[in-house]
Every structure is written in structure tokens, then in C-alpha cells.
């Protein structure tokens, strides 16, 4: 099969090109042959995290002195693209939630002691991270969260509430939890972030979800039953949690763009290969102009998403405000992916409807990306507010 390749940006240096080659090779050798079994079990083996961690891929954005690579946002894009090209969205989501959406809170805002305690194991894949923001009554509306943390007499905290749709929620080790610490504050005010260890007796995993897609990543509902935390479990400054969450959302939405780009590339290359072989009415489907044009149109839209992804990564690395651009990326990218994978499924005909075929799985996995990390409608409002 000829791989579908986008033009590589000129500003991508040799180190990141090498990372791309290594992650792609790792994906072909260590993910694709085994991932169907992970889909069936609903669980990714811990050994996968450790293998990627030993190669240095899980801590590329984190400080060198704590086991990371000290690289920028472009490294997250390269990693996300290549993991998504495996065609297994659940695997890509679990790994990037760990590397770019949970542990990154500690890397950016943790104290020296917190970084020293958690980052080396996280970068090495020995411990897995999860971020706990979404609640049963507050999804994209972060300001509406109700989980509370109350100070105790000894200066610690008592955490109470629940979180839902938490990726790595069952098999994670380090939970980054958002809670309201000022009961009088309204909306986005009075929210703080905490680090919760898996072995804390107040942490209850109340449900593991069986999902429409991303079936190889574990997703849980958590309950904090008067969970006791020491004073040093507070992450960053008290009351600044909302701003920390919003800041990390920008990176999460950048990674979504990378996942879209990689998934589109894989879906297109599979479909081009299929239609060139599939015979109908005396010739291949590729010989039908309408089929070729559809795939060319999908490739064009996918290339536009990828270009915006790399632009956003550059802006982040330059320290620029990217809220508007990453919101555009999240909305346009996720909706474009729906069009790409469903067009590819259509061109596979009946084969595309059979469970176990890659394009069928990718169509299911793609659906969550218009919802998770900020629904399309919310993203468009973020863009509109900045026009």
C-alpha cells in the first residue's frame, strides 16, 4: 500500500522528522498488530505506556530536569498525528490524554516537589495520568462544576463530588482534579486543581463505560467520598483552576487537530487502495471520475486542517494567544473528520459496514471528536466572541 502523505512543513526540524519516523515505525510494529485485542478487552496494556516512555515520546513537552524532552507544541502534533495514523483512536486518545492533557498540568504549574514526585514516572510511562474536569451536570460548561474541596483543620483538603467520561479513569495512577474551593464564588471563580493518587481510599471508580468508539481506551465515572488530601496536593494557586483548565484546553484542541490529521490520512490511503482494486461495471472504482473527485476533495479539506494545526502549534511555541485559532481548528477539524471518514466508509460499500474493518472503526472513533474537548457549538461561540 502506498502511504498517503501530506507535504512536510519546512520548519519541522530534523529531530522532529526523526520522531515522526520512529513513532510511525513503533505504531506499525507495536500497536497495529495487537490493537484489535485491546479493542475487545477495552484496555491498553501498561507495557505500551512503558515502551513509549522509554523511547522518550510521552514526556517530549516536559522539562528535561524531570525526565522530559523540553520540546515545544510541534512535538505534540507529530506524536498525535502518527498515533492516529494507526487507525485506533482509543489508543491515540489514551496516550495523548496522558502526555498532553493531564500530566502537563503538573509540568506547567506544579511545585518543584510535585514535579520531582510525579514527572519522572509519568514521562517514563511507569504511571499513567488522567484529567478530571467533566461532571454529570457540567461538560463543556466548566464554570458549572460542583465538585468541592474544603479545607480541614490540619491545613489539608476534603474532596467531595463526581467526575464522568474520564479517559484513563480506570487504569490511571495520577488524577488531576478540578474542584470548587470557594463556595461563595460563582461561575469560573473559586475553582482549584488538585493531584489525587490512585491509592487514596476516598477515590471510588463507580462505573466503566462501554462506548460507541474509542473502545480500547478505558473511560470511567469517579466518585470522591470525602477524600482526604494533604495541603501539598493543591496544584498551582488556589482559585486559579479555571484559567489553568482553559489554558490546557488550547493544547488539547491542538492535539485534536493532530488526531484529525492522522486519522484522515489513514482513512484516505485505505480508501484509495480499496477503490483502485474494487471492480464494478467492468472497471475499478478509481476509474469513476466521481470517486476520484470525492477523494481529492477529502484530501484537500484534510490538508487545510493540517495546515491550521501546524500554524496553531507555531503560534503556541511563539507564546501567542491562540484561543480563537485553536477553537477554529477544533470545530473545523472535527467536523471535517466526520465528512472524511463517512465518505471513505461509503466508498468501501458493504465492506465499510462490517465490524472489524478499519474504516468502520475509524468512523465510530471519529464521532466523539465533535463532542469531547469542547463541542463544536461551544467552539464556534469562542470564535464568534473574538471576531
Image: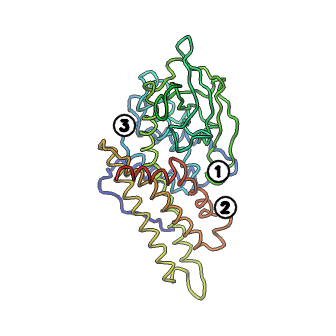
| Residue at x-position 66% and y-position 50% | 211
Dot 3: few (<14), some (14–19), or many (≥20) neighbours within 10 Å? some
Q: Name the foreground residue: 265 vs 301.
A: 301
Q: Residue furthest bottom?
A: 282
State which mark lies toward you, 1 or 2: 1
Dot 2: few (<14), some (14–19), or many (≥20) neighbours within 10 Å? few
Q: Does residue 138 lie above or below 273 as drawn?
A: above
Q: How far across and down, in percent of the image, does residue 366 sit?
A: 56, 57
N-term-proximal mark, 1 vs 3 = 3
Q: How far across and down, in percent of the image, does residue 360 sit?
A: 62, 63
Q: CA distance from mark 1 to mark 3?
A: 32 Å
Q: Does residue 241 lie above or below 232 as drawn?
A: below
Q: Are marks 3 and 2 in contact (CB under 8 Å)?
A: no
Q: Name the foreground residue: 331 vs 278.
A: 331
**Residue at which label 3 appears:** 70
N-term-proximal mark, 1 vs 2 = 1
- Left/right placement of residue 322 relative to residue 196 reads left
State which mark lies toward you, 1 or 3: 1
Give the quarter of the image for residue 358.
bottom right
Q: Are marks 1 and 2 in contact (CB under 8 Å)?
A: no
Q: Does residue 180 lie above or below 293 as drawn?
A: above
N-term-proximal mark, 3 vs 2 = 3
Q: CA distance from mark 1 to mark 2?
A: 12 Å
**Residue at which label 1 appears:** 215
**Residue at which label 2 appears:** 356
- Left/right placement of residue 283 relative to residue 221 reads left
Q: How far across and down, in percent of the image, does residue 65 sit?
A: 38, 28
Amino acid at each position: 500500500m502506498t502511504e498517503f502523505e501530506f507535504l512536510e512543513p519546512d520548519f519541522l526540524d530534523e529531530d522532529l522528522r526523526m520522531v515522526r519516523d520512529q513513532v510511525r515505525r513503533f505504531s506499525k510494529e507495536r500497536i497495529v498488530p495487537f490493537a484489535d485485542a485491546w479493542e475487545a478487552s477495552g484496555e491498553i496494556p501498561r507495557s505500551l505506556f512503558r515502551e513509549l516512555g522509554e523511547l522518550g515520546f510521552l514526556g517530549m513537552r516536559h522539562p528535561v530536569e524531570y525526565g522530559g524532552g523540553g520540546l515545544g507544541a510541534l512535538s505534540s502534533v507529530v506524536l498525535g498525528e502518527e498515533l492516529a495514523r494507526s487507525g485506533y483512536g482509543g489508543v491515540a486518545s489514551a496516550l495523548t490524554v496522558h502526555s498532553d492533557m493531564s500530566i502537563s498540568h503538573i509540568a506547567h504549574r506544579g511545585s518543584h516537589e510535585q514535579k520531582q514526585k510525579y514527572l519522572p514516572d509519568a514521562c517514563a510511562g511507569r504511571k499513567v495520568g488522567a484529567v478530571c474536569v467533566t461532571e454529570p451536570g457540567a461538560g463543556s460548561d466548566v464554570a458549572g462544576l460542583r465538585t468541592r474541596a474544603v479545607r480541614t483543620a490540619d491545613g489539608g483538603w476534603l474532596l467531595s463530588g463526581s467526575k464522568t467520561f474520564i479517559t484513563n479513569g480506570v487504569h490511571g495512577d495520577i488524577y488531576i482534579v478540578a474542584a470548587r474551593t470557594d463556595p461563595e464564588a460563582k461561575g469560573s471563580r473559586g475553582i482549584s486543581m488538585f493531584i489525587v493518587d490512585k491509592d487514596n481510599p476516598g477515590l471510588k471508580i463507580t462505573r466503566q463505560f462501554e462506548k460507541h468508539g474509542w473502545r480500547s481506551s478505558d473511560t470511567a465515572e469517579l466518585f470522591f467520598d470525602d477524600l482526604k488530601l494533604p495541603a501539598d496536593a493543591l496544584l498551582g494557586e488556589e482559585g486559579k483552576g479555571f484559567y489553568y483548565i482553559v489554558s490546557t484546553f488550547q493544547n488539547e484542541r491542538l492535539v485534536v487537530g493532530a488526531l484529525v490529521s492522522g486519522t484522515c490520512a489513514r482513512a484516505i490511503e485505505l480508501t484509495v487502495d480499496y477503490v483502485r482494486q474494487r471492480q464494478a461495471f467492468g472497471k475499478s472504482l478509481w476509474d469513476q471520475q466521481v470517486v476520484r473527485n470525492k477523494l481529492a476533495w477529502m484530501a484537500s479539506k484534510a490538508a487545510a486542517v493540517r495546515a491550521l494545526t501546524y500554524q496553531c502549534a507555531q503560534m503556541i511555541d511563539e507564546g501567542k494567544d491562540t484561543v480563537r485559532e485553536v477553537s477554529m481548528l477544533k470545530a473545523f477539524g472535527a467536523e471535517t473528520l466526520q465528512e472524511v471518514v463517512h465518505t471513505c466508509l461509503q466508498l468501501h460499500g458493504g465492506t465499510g459496514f462490517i465490524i472489524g474493518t478499519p474504516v468502520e472503526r475509524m468512523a465510530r472513533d471519529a464521532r466523539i471528536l465533535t463532542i469531547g474537548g469542547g463541542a463544536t457549538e461551544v467552539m464556534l461561540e469562542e470564535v464568534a466572541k473574538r471576531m
